[in-house]
Amino acid sequence: MIAGDSGVAELKFRDPSRGRALAGTLARLVDDIGRDPVSVMHVCGSHEQAIARFGLRASLPPKLNVIMGPGCPVCITDVPEVDEGIALARQGVCVATYGDMLKVRGSVMSLADAHAEGGKVEVVYSIAQAIELARKISDPVVFFATGFETTAVATAAAILQKPPRNFFVLSAHKYIPPVMEIVAEMPDTRVEGFLAAGHAATITGWGVFEPFVARHGTPVVVAGFEPLDILAGLVRLVELVREERAAVENMFPRCVTKQGNVRAQEQLWKVFRPIGGRWRGIAHVPNGNLRLRDEWAHIDARRQFDIDLHRLWDQAPPPLVQECVCGDIMAGIKSPTDCTLFGRECVPDSPVGACMVSSEGTCKIWHQYGGHPDLGGYGAACAR
Amino acid sequence: MCLGVPGKVIAVDGLIAVVDFWGVRKQIHLEVVDEPVQPGDYILNHVGYAIRRIPATEIEATLALYEELLAAAQKDDDLMAADIRSEINGARDDRR
């Protein structure tokens, strides 16, 4: 978990014997509930990535269904938002964005395609790099800002530091708490508890989930991203399900407090306001989108550029996208293997849906690691 | 982009820190983190911004929490019963 001389601490959060003990406890708890399946949802691509990378799914009890929810920021960035970035790049504006947005298809093409056609697209690790780029060149630079509140905080901080005049922001930022309400209210939902993302909660604090829990009677456990963090989070969540106790529990106390990072929240809400908008494949999410406040209109790419989407939309949309079930997968109703495109027309090198693009997308992770491997009882044996 | 990465602070200059991530050093912004950061501290980095200072003591506290969880589960009679049941069922154990 921690670099440098605390390499030992890093391994502590990956300790196999503790992991086995926690997995064993989890299996006993699920057995004790005596129902099949017990379904919980995590709302974070980083959770799914850790579950896949460390092979945790193989050690989870078969009766425990851990659904990956709409937790991948790349996947839920809506098609028209991707199109706005592409249209700007094709209009000759330099568009800087995070690397995982590059291959996401809009209605016609991806930013990578626009780049191949001569559009100006720059990949940056941080908004700070996009601002450096704007300082070096006199042409306008638009930062296509995607990601949840954790990422939006960096955008807010950068805007408050008064970037150069040729720097603009195209915000596609999303706010997680409202989408949990949507999932909880879906008629087909099987979700009995949520594993909330530790990084987003580092900003918002775990207190933000209390009204949600009170309204829906569904427990929420905040968990970190090391294998033990996730297993411990699941153990606590299943305990709450067993006790039928709707509560918020914080299993990531080394980063998350009840009130969160207040300084970050102040910057976030000074720059952004929440408005309703579509999440790709999910639904219209009230207060789910973060847009720049009027005070920052001079930085808002939507208000400073005439973004010509119609020229883009005149090209016929690819028919395959309509068969994509990314939305149902992110809502936890379907698995990647339920999709007729998965592993055939839709593969990481030529993705159809956004879930196959991002390293945090369910389909890409399942394609890479094999989803829920059938190890013929070996996984359960390890869990004991 | 949504991965958070912990690293050790090497140097601080105003609102910029040099942070070591498993041998890779990067400049990280300090506008967002809500506590003063000094060389030797650990921070959680997200897209080039520190979002949290991680006190070393809290790492041990988290591990202690997990131990408690295991201890509590072992004391629970119902859970022990479940364990015994699965032993008795032996080959018919459905936890495959």
Image (cartoon, helix red, strand yellow):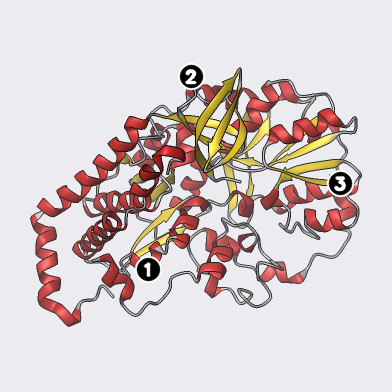
Q: Is A268 placed left or right of B90 in the picture?
A: right
What residue is rendered at 72% in x and 71% in y? Answer: A320
According to the image, label 3 marks what residue? A120
Amino acid residing under circle 3: Lys
- Whether residue A267 is visible, yes or no, is yes
Q: Chain of mark 3?
A: A
x, y percentage for residue A7? Answer: 41, 44
x, y percentage for residue A229? Answer: 36, 48
Closer mark to the observer between disc 2 and disc 1: 2
| Label 3 – label 1 distance at C-alpha | 44 Å
x, y percentage for residue A337? Answer: 53, 74
Q: Is B80 placed left or right of B58 in the picture?
A: left
- The circle drawn on residue A131 is none
As drawn, B79 above or below A337:
above
According to the image, label 2 marks what residue? B36
Amino acid residing under circle 2: Pro
Q: Secondary structure at mark 2?
A: loop
According to the image, label 1 marks what residue? A58
What residue is rendered at 61% in x and 75% in y? Answer: A343
Instruction: Bin the neighbour count of mark 2 within 10 Å (Cα to Cα): few under 14, some 14-19, many 20 and up.
Output: few
First in residue order: circle 3 vs circle 1: 1
Q: Secondary structure at mark 3?
A: loop
As drawn, A103 above or below A343:
above
Instruction: Bin the neighbour count of mark 1 within 10 Å (Cα to Cα): few under 14, some 14-19, many 20 and up.
Output: many
| Label 2 – label 1 distance at C-alpha | 42 Å
